[in-house]
Image: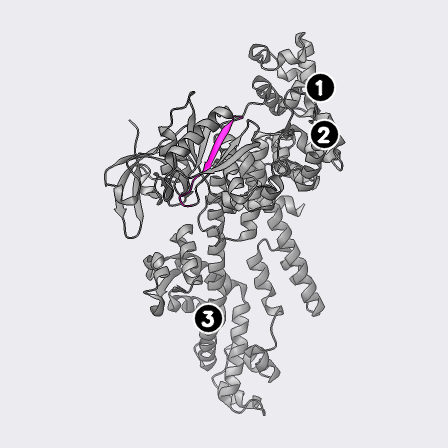
Amino acid sequence: MQLIRFILKRTQFSEKSVENTIALLYEDCTIPFISRYRKERTGNLDEVQIGEIVKFKAEFEALEKRKLAIIKAIKEQGLLTPELQSKLQDCENLNSLEDLYIPFKKSKKTKAEVARKNGLEPLAKIIMTQRSDEIEFIASKYLTNQVQNEDEALEGARHIISEWINERTDIRNQLRNQLERHALLNCKVIKTKKDNEKAQKFRDYFDWSELLNRCPSHRFLAISRAEKEGFIRVKIEIDDDRALDKIERRILKSNNACASQIEMAIADAYKRLLFPSLSNELLKNAKEKADAEAIQVFSKNLKQLLLGAPLGAKRILAIDPGFRTGCKVVCLDAQGDLKHNETIYPHAPQNDSAGAIKKISSLVDAHKIEAIAIGNGTASRETEHLVKRIRFKNPIEVFVVSEAGASIYSASKIARDEFPNYDVTVRGAVSIGRRLADPLAELVKIDAKSIGVGQYQHDVDQSRLKTSLETVVESCVNSVGVNINTASVPLLSYVSGIGPKLAENIVAHRNEYGAFKSRTEIKKVPRLGGKAFEQGAGFLRIKEGENPLDDSAVHPESYSIVEKMAKDKGIPLSKIIGNKSILQSIDIARYCDENTGIPTLQDILEELEKPGLDRREKAKVFAFNQNIRQITDLQVGQLLPGIVNNITNFGCFVDIGIKESGLIHVSNLADSYVKDVNEHVSLHEQIIVKVLDVDVPRKRIQLALHKKD
């Protein structure tokens, strides 16, 4: 099968693994389901490896679709030969496919086509034989009303020759290779925009040149944005003489008048056709590569953010801080339901700190609050300082929570459906509180692009970004599992095999008939058929249900295996769960069959040891340096606590408690070469940084990761 061969050439996977994975994908199985519950069929491929197969499958299908369109177009022209069709079908990339198609997609307005209509193609063929020194005399025989003299005849013939040169795949590949290895990316500021205030953030590229293949993705995207916004001009340059010499060596076979005409045709083909086309192709490929790297960074960041430490089911008081408009305060119960809301005005201009302290104290007592969440936006530090002055009757943990995307959520349809009787300020405060309890459950309600953890996210291919981020969200949701009796529609929609419509049906059924008592009851949900149940059941949890296995990642199709294990040990099913000594004494080889192998059985035992365990860490309290309130408070050499709030290919940004985040450049992350920033820091990690430089006018802070002793 062509698809299998295509993927095998691009991966190190076994043929059987690829064949079976493709078969499962054609059966509409999801990546989380395949990687978790079909390990025997895939050869134990993980989600990343299965994702590679999915990516190459999509590439193959796009290539095949383009092949069919090209073959059809050439066939309709009556020019498709068996040899050409074979060449087209054997193409393994779009570039070579499009090169073969060039001769058949001519516009009637090209210079070569005009020359052909004027009867000059025979003259072009004579020139290409390179056998005549009397080419001007020969050209005189082709004069017509449209071709007035020999110079016009020769010029027309050269246009045809230029087109032939442009169509030669060997020449295109040779120049393509030269561009890929030696092309310089040159940037020059547009003089009229040099002093533009918005242009200043791109001033590093006002006069910039480097090899394109050495340009890192973040810099290429920055340059692309500067060009798009009209501040700089970007050009690709190579050694033109060298490029022309290489082409001439492939074509010129003599040193006569014909060769002189061909030399001119080569120069024309290079300047007018080959170089513009292939340099644009090169920039397009560079953009796709930069996009892919930026999307990968965004995806890694999003995964870390979604799998951030949850506080868990606690009663939370959440504050969305502000100055003039006050601080919106909400009280949430352990399930995240809104119980109370109001506004306090502890800061300027009202300055009612006494009233605010009294109100927060009374709300904490009345609602038996266990933790306080404060948004990290405007007035965050002042509000945190106020709250920490309060002497509560019981110990209360205070957390500063990222507000990124909260305003997007508060104005969304999801928020309006959840809280139709409350305004955006209340919804925003609720979101802040729920993020502390469970970041994953709350952040899935927000468009991932609005969370602000990427680099140049608005400059990359939006369709590819959307697909990648949705894959990350799906992976995170299914790796943690979802409580079907408490999950929102957005959270349920990311469960394997469910989707938005079935998620709505699940919640509607739950609202009408009450909580699900077992996984088998899920089948009663309208339109939730056998396939959806198979794909999703293992990721849906039922707390305190009829079957203890329903609160585990053990798939219902494997319940009989666990029941047999318990029976063989002479104990009830409930007694085998969590019983480490008994589980370790089980010989899993006894339970292998044609559908269940060692990898699945090992997963089952691991899950039985710690059923329903949330693999995420627990949220930790954090405090900024209380003496640092603005950028002018910083001094070189200071050691400060900070939280990593964004990761890029060139370093990471750190929140140190002021409006401006500081940058730890890759060169300041470690003493040795840093290949991957994520190997040294993770998103929302609490770290100690050292201040290296403070540029107040440009609001830039350079930091270094402080090495722990």
Residue 47 versus residue 558 in the image, above or below: below
Q: Nearer the viewer, residue 492 or 479?
A: 492
Q: Which mark is residue 79?
A: none
In magenta segment, residue 605: no
Of residues 79 and 342, the one nearer the viewer is 342
Per the rendered image, the range of residues in magenta is 313-324
Crowding near the residue tagged with mark 2, few <14, some 14–19, many ≥20 C-alpha atoms within 10 Å = many
Image quarter hosting the C terminus: top left
Depicted 564 relative to depicted 343: above or below: above
- Occupied quadrant, residue 652: top left
Q: Secondary structure at mark 1?
A: helix
Q: Residue at (27%, 49%) from the top-left corner?
A: 696
- Residue 189 placement (x, y as % from top left): 35, 65
Separation of marks 1 and 2 at Cα, in angstroms = 19 Å
Residue 479 place in picture, x, y as percent:
57, 31
User: Which SS class for mark 2?
Assistant: helix
Q: Residue 260: x, y in percent?
A: 44, 79
**Quarter of the figure that contains the N terminus:** top right
Q: What residue is disc 1 on?
A: 560
Residue most extreme to the top: 570
Name the amino acid type tagged 1.
Answer: Ser
**First of labels 3, 2 by sequence position:** 3
State the CA–CA distance, disc 3 to disc 2: 66 Å
Q: How many marks?
A: 3
Badge 1 local density, few (<14 within 10 Å), some, or many (20+)?
Answer: few
Image mark for residue 270: 3
Q: Amino acid at mark 2?
A: Ile
Mark 3 Cα within 10 Å, few/some/many (few <14, many 20+)? many
What residue is disc 2 on? 522
Circles 3 and 2 in contact, beta carbons < 8 Å? no
Q: CA distance from mark 3 to mark 1?
A: 71 Å
Ranked by sequence position, the earlier of labels 3 and 1 is 3
